[in-house]
Image (cartoon, rainbow, N blue to C red):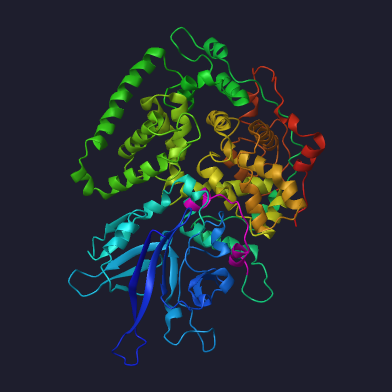
Amino acid sequence: VVYEQEGVFIHSSCGKNDDQDNLIAGILRVIEQENEVVVDWRPLDETLDTSNILCAGKDSSSVVEWTQTPKEKCSRGADRPSSYEAEWDMVTTVSFKKKPHSNGDATTHANGESKWSFLFSLTDLKSIKQNKEGMGWSYLVFCLKDDVKLPALHFHRGDSKLLIKCLEKHVVLTESPHDERVLLVKTQKSLSQSFENLFDEPSYGLLQKWKKDPYIVTMGKFSRVTNYIVGSLRSSDSSNQRRPPSEMADFLNDTIPGLKINQQEEPGFEVITRIDLGKQPEVSRREPVSAEEWAKNMDSEGRILDVDYMKRLIFKGGLCHTLRKEAWKFLLGYFPWNSTKEERANLQKRKTDEYFRMKLQWKSVSEEQEKRNSRLRDYRSLIEKDVNRTDRTNKFYEGEDNPGLILLHDILMTYCMYDFDLGYVQGMSDLLSPVLYVMENEVDAFWCFVSYMDQMHQNFEEQMQGMKTQLIQLSHLLRLLDSGFCSYLESQDSGYLYFCFRWLLIRFKREFSFQDILRLWEVMWTELPCQNFHLLLCCAILESEKQQIMDKHYGFNEILKHINELSMKIDVEYILCKAEAISMQMMNCKELPQTVSEILGIENSSVTPDSDTGEDESGAELSCPASLYQSVPAPVTAANGTRDGAQQAAETQSLTPA
């Protein structure tokens, strides 16, 4: 309990006379739990029946109500219902509505105290309204998201300033430009909570918070399964029926406008399910590119002789660590591939000047100026919080006063000057961390990060256009690859693949070990063997887990839990092999659907848009395979030796649609 105040009253209109308020004395607490802060007001009557406390419940339309909560699920003080403890249940309430109480609904004390008790998370707070000084008792009105106002709290024993100061330690409050009495909660605060907090964030339900804030949802760790989340996906009738997949798709479409994940209703998909991709080929990987190989492919002026050849080598084996500092600048587009050593030196000099000019912009802002620049102030606060929790187990960032942390902070602050419209959003510190680790140089790391953010920018924009597009594209690819698995996911209300959101948002940063991410990213940056190779990596991971999910009849909760527990357990070399094999399968398909062809950027002359009756054409030209495997030294390492042939056959087996 970080704040506690007695003598906080609700003035209800339940008095005997219409013009007389009934004063309900209560105690107000701010409770700081592991990764959540809650505000709790309840009457002082110790005999209060806790079954009447207004906690979040769900009705059949997934709208949160104030309902009578069973005693065993709603205890006093910091003890929370078991549903609140679900670390993977990362969803904030969508809306509140006061549920009408009919006579005989539940026991209610004569003074009506139980009807007014409330408890909410700060993640649900939208604004606070205060009364002006000299207007009697000070009072506060909490307005939650969706503009639902809680009863006014009157402070009879002192003012409310201490409460405001306490809340400001956890949320950013700014004065409304339209009403000086109203303090607004900055939404960016919640968007950019640190990863470490979000990994264990308890909250109120999955789909509701996904609708409110998909970024936070995807950063949460799906580690426990509770019955509470099931309630949000089931109807309220006694039969406890599942909602139909089509309804779930409609809900998600409302969540992210424009996101239309197929539920076997679009006519084109019936065609795709009939296409036989054939057997996945065996794929091996080679050793990482060595410094000697890199040097041999460079002329006397430092120009790369054969860019395509070098990209193919990197795709097939990655880079030895000593090469990364130089090669990543080419892969990310900071250095042009056809530039000379002298041209690159001149470029670095110009970029160094440009970087420090931008850095000086925020460095030279005085405290007085910053007080009048709320956006810069918010960016700084969020960056400081996230930097202190980014990859702290890595030696490059561990310990106090670590210079790596200072550089991480300064680069992110300077990026706010480079792109002030986007500024800083949660997840960006994790994209920068490996880049800075490899570069070991502030300026080079910044410009490589800028290039990386050019690729990832749409992922972090408010409209989430990049995420919408990728989820839809992933759905197309997975349905072509395994329509039976897609049908199974849909039957478990999981066909919209929202559990892949985090993978896509920060390019698997939280799914692989730090060293494996270095390998994975450099392979993806080659842009081989096709466009959107990262989507095929998603397909490879899901297909690898398909058999277990289906054989054990995993439902919605189990799928969530299982997918999230793959974090740090995935073999990067195996998944790279599998994803490459899937790409070869699709490139060799002579009846590849037009949609899939466009997603992967494959030029196949036998592609037919929405028909499976087109004649096969021998000699169909594919844009990538011919160039990918030309002049690449024979592979020396078989990465898929970790699984036997029977298991691989089971994983790639085609299943009949449910």
Task: Name the spot of residue 630 as percent of width and height, x first.
Answer: 65, 20
The front one of 568 and 20 is 20
Q: Which residue lies furthest to the front in this view?
A: 46
Q: Give the range drawn in magenta.
A: 216-234
Which residue is rendered at x = 19% and y = 74% of the image? 135
Task: Name the spot of residue 530 as percent of width and height, x first.
Answer: 59, 33
Residue 341, quarter of picture:
top left
Instruction: Verify whether residue 219 appears in magenta.
Output: yes
**For the N terminus, which image quadrant?**
bottom left
User: Does residue 393 appear to the left or right of 149 in the view shown?
Assistant: right
**For the C terminus, which image quadrant?**
bottom right
Which residue is rendered at x = 49% and y = 15% of the image? 304
User: Does residue 110 appear to the left or right of 409 in the view shown?
Assistant: right
Instruction: Verify whether residue 373 appears in magenta.
Output: no
Residue 312, quarter of picture:
top right
User: Does residue 238 appear to the left or right of 154 in the view shown?
Assistant: right
